[in-house]
Image (tube, rainbow, N blue to C red):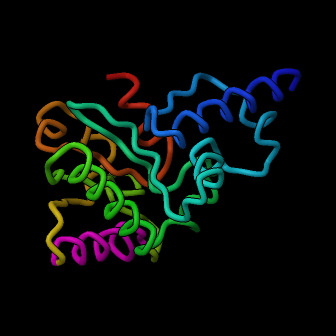
């Protein structure tokens, strides 16, 4: 908590550099989010978005070999299934596609991880079939290069991940843990 003023100042300097046009990139190091954000934002992505008055955002961890993006960011697991919906999945895919086309120069191939183990559920309601699959079908019909839902425990296997530019997951650690391990 003693570092909050320093951290805020560092962000402000970074924001000023971006606004001046000197750079359009920002790298942040480890921050105690609970102390710095004080429960006002889910994470740094939302904090930065608010500062730049951006309403729609995506936490894309970009890498030339393979990028990842969670649909939900810093939510407790018990809230993920309540927050995953078709519109949010579509919003993230549209943002990812736009970034790749405008900034990287090509249309990405996107794999989508399901929410449940093996994309199955013992319950009557299965998010993978009721929410995720219809969103993918709609996006595919609209011309996006997208496949899934894939089981999260196998989509990161070498023979699977090499077919895609981006893996979209339903929650933070579902995609950030594997990419950090790789």
Q: In this rendering, would 103 be left or right of 15?
A: left
Is residue 115 covered in magenta? no
Q: In this rendering, would 34 be left or right of 98?
A: right
On the image, the x and y values in percent for residue 50 come to 64, 55
- Asked if one can make out residue 76 in the rendered structure from this viewpoint, the answer is no
Which quadrant would the N terminus be assigned to in this image?
top right
Up-down relation of residue 41 to residue 175 (above or below): below
Along the line of sight, the residue nearer the viewer: 161 or 9? 9
- What residue sits 72% from the left and 35% below the top? 33
- What residue sits 46% from the left and 39% below the top? 21
Is residue 132 covered in magenta? yes
- What residue sits 20% from the left and 30% below the top? 65
The secondary structure that dominates the magenta segment is helix
- Asked if one can make out residue 158 in the rendered structure from this viewpoint, the answer is yes
On the image, the x and y values in percent for residue 98 come to 28, 58
Up-down relation of residue 44 to residue 17 (above or below): below
Q: In this rendering, would 37 be left or right of 14?
A: right
> What span is colored magenta in the figure?
126-141
Up-down relation of residue 8 to residue 128 (above or below): above
């Amino acid at each position: 908590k003693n570092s909050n003023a320093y951290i805020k100042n560092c962000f402000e300097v970074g924001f000023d550099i971006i606004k001046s046009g000197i750079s359009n990139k920002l790298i942040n190091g480890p921050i105690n989010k609970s102390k710095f954000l004080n429960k006002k934002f889910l994470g740094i992505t939302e904090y930065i978005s608010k500062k730049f008055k951006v309403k729609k955002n995506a936490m894309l961890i970009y890498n030339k070999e393979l990028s990842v993006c969670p649909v939900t960011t810093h939510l407790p697991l018990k809230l993920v299934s309540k927050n995953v919906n078709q519109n949010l999945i579509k919003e993230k895919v549209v943002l990812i596609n736009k970034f790749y086309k405008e900034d990287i120069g090509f249309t990405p191939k996107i794999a989508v991880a399901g929410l449940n183990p093996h994309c199955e559920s013992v319950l009557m309601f299965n998010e993978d079939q009721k929410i995720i699959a219809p969103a993918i079908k709609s996006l595919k019909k609209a011309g996006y290069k997208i496949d899934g839902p894939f089981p999260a425990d196998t989509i990161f296997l070498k023979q699977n991940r090499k077919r895609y530019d981006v893996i979209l997951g339903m929650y933070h650690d579902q995609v950030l843990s594997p990419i950090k391990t790789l």
